[in-house]
Each structure stands twice: as structure tokens, then as C-alpha cells.
Amino acid sequence: MKLFETPPDWKKTLREYALITAAVLVMVVGIYFFKFPNHFAFGGVSGLSTVISQMTGMTASTFTNIANYALLVVGFAFLGKSVGVRTVYATIVMSIGLELLEKLVPLSAPLTSEPLLELIFAIACPAIGSAILFNISASSGGTDIIAMILQKYTSIHIGTALLLVDLASVVLSFFVFGPATGLYSLLGLIGKSLGIDGVIESMNRSKCFTIVCDHPDPICDYIINTLHRSATVYEAKGAFTHQPKTVIMSTMKPHQAIHLRNFIRQTEKGAFIQITNSSEIIGKGFLAN
């Protein structure tokens, strides 16, 4: 081992915090440039802040930061130290990002005259950022903390949890900003909740192979030594021909699945291949138990 080599745990931690930073900055861009100027009141604290700023005169960025810091106390109480530390970091990054943009790029009106176009970006940016954070058991704070608590202690899916805790700000927007903004906010809330689920599933998607063949050794060798995955092998018998067959079961990432499919087609053209998608694989090499 080299004297000054960085321990593997530190490398993993640095990668995680770099990912958290990138995810939060994507969220900040969507919130500041697209959500705040259009008064889109969806997405938890940042959505509620658009209503509160209109009612009190406090800037949306200031209210968002105050509320996020207050909810951190709840996060430490219910989610534990590990999630709490990462959430604190994400909250600080969001706070600094919003404050800097407010000072460097002040906005008095939306960027364009197309609210539907801006709604798409107001949905996409926070949804992508939140999905990345949830996927590594982190949070940007605010109502995300409440959603993670509901996910931990109940059977409610995280997208449904966010929908429940964010609904209040959308209802208020109808009274404060009028029906048009209220309807945009409702559409944004639904889109963000569905978007988070979709992004998380895409990030965790794996391909599950069930291969029925006569010559399993070349296929297993390719899976183990070339793709660096594992497999389960068992003997079977064809129901029609009563001939002995070998069944190989293996799970891998989508880009590896393409290589395995092509290899099997070249090596054993008569093999039967069933490929299914899975968004949650728990075990060594995939999600932690």
C-alpha cells in the first residue's frame, strides 16, 4: 500500500459529496430561475416560499433557507446521523446557491413569456436533483425530510409521500396567485412526484437474464470473466422434447446486458433468452441490504 494513498472509504465519501453538490446545484437552478419568478407553488418549502413571500414581503430565498434549517432538527431526530450530516451539507449548498444567485442575478420577472415551457424546467431540475439525492439516502432538506421519514416508518412510496406533504402550498397558491398559477402549480406537483419515481427507477434499472441452453460453460465464463458478474445455474428438462437443458440466471446493468445478449446470439443461436427489467435489486454488487 502506498504511504499517502487515499483510503477507499474517503474516495467513496468524496464521490458521494460531489454527487450531492451537483444534484443540489441542479435543483437551485430550477428553483431560482424557473419556480420563483413564475410563483409556481409546488415542491415543498421552495413552493411554499413563493406564497409566503407574496404574503409577507420576505424573499422566497430567505424563507426557503430559514425553513430548511428549522426542519433539519426533525431530520436529525428521525433519520439518524448519517443521513442528517449529508442533509446538512445539501441544505448549506442550497442556501449558499440561492443567496448567491439572488445577489448576482436578481430577477424581477420570468425569463420568458412561456409559462408552460418554464414549468417543464421547474419540474425537471428539482426532480432530477431530488432523485439523485434520494438514491444515495440523502436529502436537500425541507419537506424532503418529511417524505423520507414517511418512507422509513410507513409503506408509502416516496413519490406519494412528497405529493401528500406538498399539497398545502398548491392549495394556497389558488387563493394567493389565482386559478392560472394554481393550476400550473398543481400540474407541476404531479409532474415532479412522477418524475422523481421515474428518475430513481432509471438510475437503478437492471436487466435480469433467464437463459435456457445446451452449452452453459462459454456463457458462464463470459458472464464471470468478461462482464465480472455472477450467475446461478441449474438443470432442467424441456416439457415437449424431454431433453435435458441448463438454465442460467444472471442480473447486470443495461450496458452489460447488451454485450451478453450479443455474445449468446453468436455463441449459441438456439438458446432461449428471457430478459426482464428490474428497478430494485438488493444484494452484493447492487443496492445494499
Image: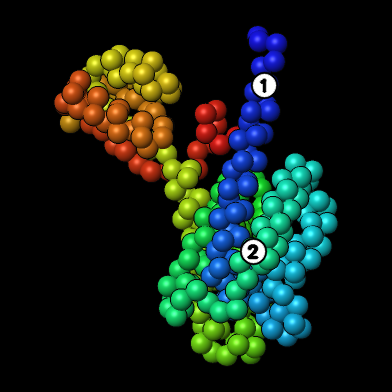
Residue 259 seen in render: yes
Give how far apart the Cα atoms at labels 1 and 2 are. 37 Å
Local crowd at mark 1 within 10 Å, few (<14), some, or many (≥20)? few
Q: Reading the chain from its start, which is encountered first: label 1 or label 2?
A: 1
Label 2 sits on a secondary structure element that is helix
Q: Which residue is mark 1?
A: 6
In which image quadrant can residue 236 be found?
top left
Q: Amino acid at mark 2?
A: Leu
Residue 237 seen in render: no
Total numbered badges shown on the rendered structure: 2
Instruction: Pinpoint residue 110: horizontal percent, then vertical percent.
Output: 53, 77
Instruction: Pinpoint residue 152: horizontal percent, then vertical percent.
Output: 69, 52
* Image quarter of the C terminus: top right
Indicate which disc residue 176 carries. Answer: none
Q: Which of pointers 1 and 2 indicates the residue nearer the eye?
A: 2
Q: Is residue 265 above or below residue 142?
A: above
Q: Nearer the viewer, residue 49 or 73?
A: 49
Which residue: 76% across, 83% down? 56
Q: Is residue 96 above or below residue 36?
A: above
Is residue 130 shown left or right of residue 266?
right
Which color scheme does this rendered protein use? rainbow
Q: Is residue 278 above or below residue 50?
A: above
Which residue: 58% across, 50% down? 23
Instruction: Pinpoint residue 122: horizontal percent, then vertical percent.
Output: 52, 67
Is residue 31 shown left or right of residue 123?
right
In which image quadrant can residue 230 be found?
top left
Q: Which residue is mark 2?
A: 104
Q: Amino acid at mark 1?
A: Thr
Q: Nearer the viewer, residue 233 or 130?
A: 130
Q: Nearer the viewer, residue 86 or 215?
A: 86
